[in-house]
Image (cartoon, rainbow, N blue to C red):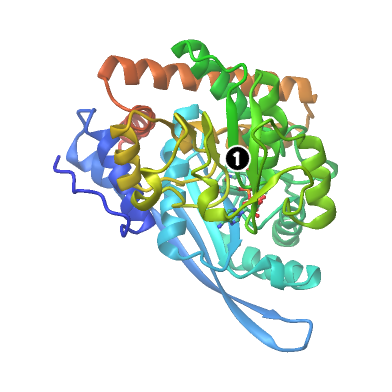
C-alpha cells in the first residue's frame, strides 16, 4: 500500500491514518475490511446551549465520534478543550479502537469533546454544560452501546454529572460512564491507572530488552492525572525524575526532584512553577532537556519535525495521546530513539475503566490490590506481544502495536459478517 511522506501539517486524523496504514502494511487484510476500519461508524455534532452565571445564553459545540464497535460497546473519554474539533475527536476515537483491541478488552473505540475552556467556566456552568451535552448525545449512549469517561479537562465530578443526567432519562445507571468518584461506583485505582500502567509497561519492556532502569533520568511533560501519577510511581523502578512541567513552566534539577513535595506545591500554587531548589525551564526547551526517558503526558503533537532532532532522551514513553507527529516519529526512529507508543503506554486508563464497568454491571466492588494486579497482568501481556512482534517483523513498537490491534478488529469484523 502506498504510504505518503508524513509532514507536521497533517491533521490529527490524517496522522492516525498514517500510523494505521503503517501497521496494516504488515498484515494481509482484505481491502473491504481495511475500508471499514478506516472510517468512523458514527459521528454526532450537537449544539450545547448553556445559560451562563451572568444570564447570557452561550451555545457551545459538542461531538461524539464512535469509530468502531466490532469488538464491543464504544469506549472513550470526553475532553473539554478550546481546540477540540471534529478531526481531533475522530483521530482520538480511532486511537481508542486500536488501544482497546491491543489490550484485548471487549470494547470498540469512541471519543467526545466540547469546545470550551473549562478554566473559564464556574462549577455550576460546567454542571449545566455537562448535563445538556449528555442529554443531546444520550440516544447513542448506553452501557452496551457507548460508555464515556474522563479525558483532558474533565474529571470524576464531570462523570458524576453525566451519570446523573443519563439517569434522569433511563434510571440509575452507574455503568454508563467510567472515571466516576468511588462513592458513586468508581473503581479503586482508576485515577492512578494510566500512570501505573505506564510503569508496568516500562518495567516489562526493560526486562525484555535488558535496559537498566536503576538510576535512569526521567523528564515528564504534564502534571495532571496521568503525569502526576507517572511521576509518583516511576521511582518504584529505581528511575529518578529530574524534570516536570505543566502548561505554564517546567522545573528541572539534574540531581532529582522530590515528587511528593512538587505535588503538594502544585496543589497549593496551581502550578509546578516556583518550586524551590529547581531551575525554571520554558515549555519549548523542556522536551529537549538531557535525560534517558522522556514522558510526554500533556497534549498532542508536542514532538514535531522541528524539535525531534533536539530530543536527547533515548526512550520516549508516550503517556499522552498522539504526542508525536508521524514526521517526528520517522525522525526519532532514524536517530535510534525508541518510541513506546501511546496506544500501549497509556492503555491502563481504559483497562481500569473496563474493570469499573465490569464491577458496576456485577454490582460487586473489587479491592484496589485486585485492580492493580489485573492491570499489571494485561499491561505486561500487551507489552510482551508488542515487543515480540516488533522483533519478529523488524518493525517499530508503534507499527507492531497498531498491527496487533488492527488484526483483532479485522478478525471481529469478518467473524461478525460485516464484509
Ligand atoms: P489533565 O488535564 O489532568 O493534565 C494535563 C497536564 O498537561 C496539566 O499539568 C497541564 O498543565 C499540562 N498541559 C496542558 N497543556 C500543555 C502544554 N501545551 N504544554 C505543556 N503542558 C501542558 O489531563 P490528563 O488526564 O493527565 O491527560 C493527559 C494526556 O493523557 C492527554 O493526552 C489524554 O488524552 C491522555 N490520557 C488520559 C487518560 C486519563 O484517564 N486521564 C488516559 C489515557 C490517556
Q: Is residue 86 above or below residue 331?
A: below
Q: Considering depth in this image, is 238 or 286 the residue closer to the camera?
A: 286
Image quadrant holding the N terminus, namely top left
Q: Which residue is mark 1?
A: 220
Q: Mark 1 packing: few (<14 Cα in 10 Å), some, or many (20+)?
A: many
The residue carrying mark 1 has its beta carbon less than 8 Å from ligand 1 = no
Question: What is the x, y in percent for residue 390?
Answer: 33, 21
State the SS at label 1: strand
Image: 411 above or below 72: above
Pick out the residue farthest to the left: 2
User: Can residue 418 be seen in this snapshot?
Assistant: no
Locate residue 249: give its quadrant: bottom right
Q: Position of residue 165 (x, y in %)?
A: 73, 62
Q: Residue at x 68, y 35 (%)?
A: 231
Residue at the image position 64 percent from the left and 66 percent from the top: 135
Left or right placement of residue 342 versus residue 2 in this view: right
Q: Is residue 244 left or right of residue 24?
A: right
Amino acid at each position: 500500500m502506498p504510504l505518503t511522506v508524513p509532514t507536521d501539517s497533517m491533521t490529527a486524523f490524517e496522522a492516525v491514518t498514517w500510523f494505521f496504514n503503517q501497521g496494516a502494511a504488515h498484515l494481509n487484510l482484505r481491502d473491504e475490511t481495511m475500508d471499514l476500519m478506516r472510517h468512523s461508524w458514527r459521528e454526532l455534532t450537537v449544539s450545547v446551549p448553556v445559560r451562563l452565571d451572568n444570564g447570557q445564553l452561550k451555545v457551545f459545540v459538542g461531538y461524539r465520534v464512535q469509530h468502531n464497535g466490532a469488538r464491543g460497546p464504544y469506549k472513550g473519554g470526553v475532553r473539554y478543550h478550546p481546540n477540540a474539533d471534529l478531526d481531533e475527536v475522530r483521530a482520538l476515537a480511532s486511537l481508542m479502537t486500536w488501544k482497546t483491541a491491543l489490550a484485548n478488552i471487549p470494547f470498540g473505540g469512541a471519543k467526545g469533546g466540547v469546545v470550551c475552556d473549562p478554566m473559564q467556566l464556574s462549577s455550576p456552568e460546567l454542571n449545566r454544560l455537562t448535563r445538556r451535552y449528555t442529554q443531546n448525545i444520550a440516544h447513542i449512549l448506553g452501557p452496551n452501546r457507548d460508555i464515556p469517561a474522563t479525558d483532558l479537562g474533565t474529571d470524576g465530578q464531570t462523570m458524576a454529572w453525566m451519570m446523573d443526567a443519563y439517569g434522569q432519562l433511563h434510571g440509575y445507571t452507574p455503568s454508563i460512564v467510567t472515571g466516576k468518584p468511588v462513592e458513586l461506583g468508581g473503581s479503586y485505582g482508576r485515577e492512578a491507572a494510566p500512570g501505573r500502567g505506564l510503569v508496568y509497561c516500562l518495567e516489562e519492556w526493560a526486562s525484555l530488552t535488558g535496559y537498566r532502569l536503576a538510576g535512569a533520568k526521567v523528564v515528564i511533560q504534564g502534571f495532571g492525572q496521568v503525569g502526576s501519577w507517572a511521576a509518583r510511581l516511576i521511582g518504584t523502578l529505581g528511575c529518578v525524575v529530574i524534570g516536570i512541567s505543566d502548561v505554564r513552566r517546567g522545573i528541572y534539577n539534574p540531581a532529582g526532584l522530590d515528587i511528593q513535595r512538587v505535588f503538594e506545591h502544585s496543589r497549593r500554587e496551581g502550578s509546578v512553577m516556583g518550586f524551590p531548589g529547581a531551575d525554571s525551564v520554558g515549555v519549548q526547551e523542556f522536551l529537549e532537556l538531557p535525560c534517558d526517558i522522556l514522558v510526554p503526558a500533556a497534549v498532542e503533537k508536542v514532538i514535531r519535525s522541528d524539535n525531534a532532532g533536539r530530543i536527547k532522551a533515548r526512550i520516549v514513553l508516550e503517556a499522552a495521546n498522539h504526542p508525536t507527529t508521524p514526521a517526528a516519529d520517522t525522525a526519532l526512529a532514524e536517530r535510534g530513539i525508541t518510541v513506546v507508543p501511546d496506544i500501549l503506554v497509556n492503555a491502563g486508563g481504559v483497562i481500569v475503566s473496563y474493570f469499573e464497568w465490569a464491577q458496576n454491571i456485577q454490582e460487586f466492588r473489587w479491592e484496589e490490590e485486585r485492580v492493580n494486579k489485573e492491570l499489571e497482568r494485561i499491561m505486561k501481556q500487551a507489552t510482551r506481544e508488542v515487543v515480540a512482534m516488533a522483533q519478529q517483523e523488524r518493525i517499530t513498537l508503534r507499527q507492531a502495536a497498531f498491527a496487533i490491534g488492527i488484526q483483532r478488529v479485522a478478525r471481529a469484523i469478518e467473524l461478525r459478517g460485516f464484509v
